[in-house]
Image (spheres, helix red, strand yellow):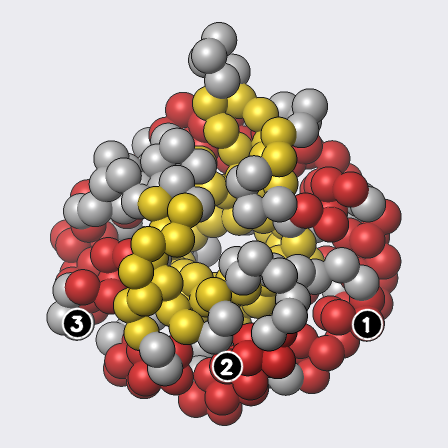
Amino acid sequence: MLKHRLVVVLILSEGQIVQSVQFKLTNVIHAHPDIAVDFFNLWAVDEIVLLDVSRSTDKRDRFYDALDKLSRKCMVPLAVGGWVTSIEEMKRLLGLGADKIILNTAAVRNPSLITEGALCFGRQCMVVSIDARRQADCTYRVHIDRGREPTEHDPVLWAQQARDVGAGELFLNCIDNDGFRKGYDLKLLKAITSSVNIPVVAMGGVFTWQHLVEGITLGGADAVAAANIFHYTEHSTKKAKKHMRNSGVNVR
């Protein structure tokens, strides 16, 4: 049986780590992301996700600089996303140290980009991020452009399509739960994990270590991720893994 991963998400805006609540940026957590990576290297994290959520690419060089510095220190796989719209951009990010590329808006607007990336770099390199929001009728819709633009895509059907065109992994985030400390949207998570045969990383809403356990045992996730909580708890990932092991989860 494959062991489950614990993933730390670093959300960057203009090169600084920020906190997110329903995809709205609140306060700066770390002005120097490389310092955060020093801690996570020591605290037994399995993977780091680096997302550029800046409102424009005007200061994209700050993100490139942060990635370059982080990759030199990072001792675990590094998945990178945000403003990725071309093969050339993927090459640049990989050249700066990324191990995986995360696509979101560009994947929805141009699914062939997933296929092109998989052909160039291998499907294990291609991660499709799905940002979903609950509707008034209790269904879900995929949103893009940092959660601001609704689409007609059903998350389950989009997950299957992304897999079919070359995605090697999915990164699922429920916008409604982001930063709200209620745990993952287990209904949505289970619907996705039951419908695809590729790894699914759960994200959005973690406040207790038990939420991580539930993402795996109830939601069926292959890996569980969080952002805000790991920045405010000392030795956070070590404590999280200890709790997961004590709860019977097979973690690395």
Kind of element beneath mark 2: helix
Structural distance between the alpha carbons of marks 2 and 1: 19 Å
Relative to 170, is 62 above or below?
below
Sequence-first tag of 1 and 3: 1
Question: Which mark, by number, is residue 235?
Answer: 3
Outermost top residue: 137
> CB under 8 Å between callouts 3 and 2?
no
> CB under 8 Å between callouts 1 and 3?
no
User: Where does label 2 land, which residue?
Assistant: 66
Relative to 131, is 117 above or below?
below
Q: Is residue 181 left or right of residue 85?
A: left
Relative to 31, is 136 above or below?
above
Q: Residue at x 85, y 58 (%)?
A: 116
**Label 2 amino acid?**
Ala
Q: Quadrant of residue 26?
A: bottom left
Kind of element beneath mark 3: loop
> CB under 8 Å between callouts 2 and 1?
no
Residue 139 at x, y = what percent? 51, 16
Structural distance between the alpha carbons of marks 1 and 3: 37 Å
Q: Is residue 11 left or right of residue 212?
A: right
Q: Residue at x 25, y 62 (%)?
A: 230
Q: Nearer the viewer, residue 89 or 47?
A: 89
User: Where does label 1 land, which residue?
Assistant: 88
Structural distance between the alpha carbons of marks 3 and 2: 23 Å
Please indicate, yes or no, whether residue 226 appears anywhere in the rendered image: no
The C terminus is located in which quarter? bottom left
**Label 3 amino acid?**
His
Q: Quadrant of residue 156?
A: top right
Mark 1 nearby-residue class (10 Å; few <14, some 14–19, many ≥20)? few
Mark 3 nearby-residue class (10 Å; few <14, some 14–19, many ≥20)? some
